[in-house]
DNA sequence: TGGTTATATGAGACAAACTCATAAATTTCA
DNA sequence: TGAAATTTATGAGTTTGTCTCATATAACCA
């Protein structure tokens, strides 16, 4: 004997209890009194227990019925909460914004952007996922993340790359370093140096993809460091050289013992993009994020 | 836009998630894959949000779908718990046993009985309600209580009075009290005494209903005391006399400074009954309670 | 790219739930 | 106490929604 309880039944039990009678409850629920009578009769038959005292006239709950009432009072608000959340989603107030960043240094400007965003869109679930920095675009397509920050746009059917701002990867070295005397730095200059980079594959590092790999130059040494601040400290104390986006060295002032130089005579310019699924471009909060990123970029350039 | 969420949907969401696909879930739920497809399509239409990623092949939950999954995982166990409780009720293992006691002294033997009962019937919700000692029988008929302990049986259509045991209301007085010298006590003997009783109406007190009211005798003083132990203390210190069921004075030995005497030459014998709704007589635990009460009574008589 | 697996869709069958009309039971009030 | 009013129950018929069957479409994998 299996009981076929449904939300309808819980709502009925709760309403009959609160209204203090079948007829009034029927009125509240916009349903006939007959329907309710049939409904609870069916429920009682399936449950195998009496839920209401019928001998009494405005009918009341039995202990078993009261148990069901407690269940209703626990469960129904949960349903309502979910309904409310969903209405948020429908109306674009709520949603998920999980961001994958390919460029390791992007924390620097992304965190303040997200701090602002969070206040504007309190119902949006924000997160940064540096974990899948390698294959972020497949993750985007599989809807595991919603935005990918990248400087290597690809031509994909369902993904749109929106330019955020331009930046220049610049050479960073200790002020006492011999190369600090040069006007600009070329690939060859790295030959005798220890290069400090973020711990990601070479293809994702501007130094390699834009300079060293094309010139087939291999630095004397390599060292991988997670944090921007630490990279700059190591560079300042002349333990190696690095290449970082210009805004990083402008913004972060952990030490003044390093100098920056452009890469190549003309300098290298790159563009940072926000990649999203085409369908998500209609979402206001996605557009807002991109806008905020642009604003933040301006601040950084001026700094 | 109203969302018509039902338990069925929660089960579906949960099963699809666990099975890792629509087809497998359909198999587990003993339903066609088509039905599930229709079901979630309908749900998504009404909710207005996508619950599953259809671009991916074994389809997966969207964030909204995951929200629903969390709801399912919270709610479904609650349902199961209630189902289990109800099956207990159906099979007579569980139920409610709320007892109203008209006779105030009955705590003395009822508590140990219930202690035993509780172990035998762990799923029965036991309670004593001394509050409605006055109109206990209407409460029984309205299913507010399930058993009434009373010594005044009435002839009611739907209520059955089952004799539990006989007892004798006996006179209790200080050992130093002049009446302690008499072989038996008559109504007239109360004329100069202060009578200590439970705080209930006269009609419910054996002294009045069986002795004083018929004889039109009024004691010199009256004092109402809640607790049996206190009544006996007061009697022992000669602050008044009392009439209590014989088992009380046999069992409770708070003080040895009091003596008991029978009421009238022949002694008065009364019977204590358990009143229940006729329909409840089929319940095993009700029969068991009555049986246990009889056993306890025997112990008291022997003590 | 073609085979395979997984999901979607449409039409019809079926069952559940509702409405309407009315009966039965309980309470109220004169 | 008995008639009126109120409240719940019941049966028949209709509507609504959910399921199945057959088949189309889409994604995955080699």
Image (cartoon, coloured by chain):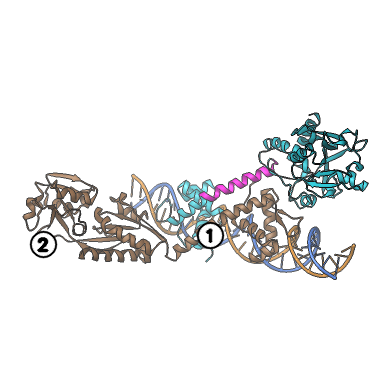
Chain colours: A brown, B cyan, C blue, D orange
Q: Residue B59 appears at what percent x and percent y? A: 43, 52
Q: Residues within 10 Å of mark 2 (few under 14, many from 20)?
A: few
Protein chain holding label 2 = A
Looking at the image, which is closer to me, B172 or B38? B172
Q: Which of pointers 2 and 1 lies earlier in the amino acid sequence?
A: 1
Stretch of the chain drawn in magenta: B73-92
Q: Quadrant of the C terminus of chain A?
A: bottom left
Q: Residue B145 appears at what percent x and percent y? A: 74, 48
Q: Is residue A177 above or below residue A28?
A: above
Protein chain holding label 1 = A
Which residue is outermost to the top? B302
Q: Is residue A273 left or right of residue B73?
A: left
Are callouts 2 and 1 both on one chain? yes
Q: Is residue B206 left or right of residue B282?
A: right
Q: Quadrant of the N terminus of chain A?
A: top right
Mark 1 lies on residue = A80
Q: Quadrant of residue B274?
A: top right
Q: Residue A266 appears at what percent x and percent y? A: 10, 62
* Residue B78 falls within the magenta-colored stretch: yes
Disc 2, SS: loop
- Report the residue at 54% width, 50% height from top: B75
Looking at the image, which is closer to me, B299 or B224? B224
Q: Residues within 10 Å of mark 1 (few under 14, many from 20)?
A: few
Mark 2 lies on residue = A266
Distance from label 2 to label 1 (Cα)? Answer: 61 Å
Q: Is residue A303 above or below residue B275?
A: below
* Residue A244 falls within the magenta-colored stretch: no
């Amino acid at each position: 004997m299996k009981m076929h309880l449904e939300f309808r039944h819980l709502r009925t039990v709760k309403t009959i209890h609160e209204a203090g009678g079948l007829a009034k409850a029927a009125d509240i629920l916009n349903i006939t009194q007959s329907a309710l009578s049939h409904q609870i009769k069916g429920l009682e038959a399936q449950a195998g227990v009496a839920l209401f005292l019928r001998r009494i006239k405005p009918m009341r709950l039995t202990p078993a019925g009261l148990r069901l009432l407690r269940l209703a009072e626990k469960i129904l608000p949960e349903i309502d909460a979910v309904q409310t959340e969903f209405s948020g989603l429908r109306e674009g107030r709520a949603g998920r914004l999980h961001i994958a960043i390919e460029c390791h240094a992007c924390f620097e400007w992304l965190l303040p952007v997200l701090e602002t965003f969070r206040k504007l869109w309190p119902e949006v679930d924000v997160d940064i996922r540096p974990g899948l920095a390698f294959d972020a675009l497949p993750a985007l397509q599989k809807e595991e993340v919603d935005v990918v920050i990248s400087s290597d746009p690809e031509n994909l059917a369902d993904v749109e790359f929106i330019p955020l701002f331009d930046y220049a990867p610049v050479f960073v070295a200790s002020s006492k370093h011999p190369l600090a005397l040069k006007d600009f730095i070329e690939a060859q200059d790295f030959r005798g140096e220890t290069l400090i980079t973020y711990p990601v594959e070479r293809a994702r590092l501007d130094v390699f993809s834009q300079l060293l790999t094309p010139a087939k130059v291999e630095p004397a040494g390599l060292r991988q460091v997670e944090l921007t601040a630490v990279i700059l400290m190591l560079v300042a104390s002349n333990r190696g050289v690095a290449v970082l986006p210009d805004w990083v060295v402008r913004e972060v002032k952990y030490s003044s013992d390093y100098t920056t130089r452009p890469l190549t005579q003309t300098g290298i310019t790159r563009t940072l993009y926000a990649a999203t699924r085409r369908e998500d471009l209609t979402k206001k909060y996605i557009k807002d994020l991109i806008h905020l990123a642009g604003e933040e970029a301006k601040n950084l350039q001026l700094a």
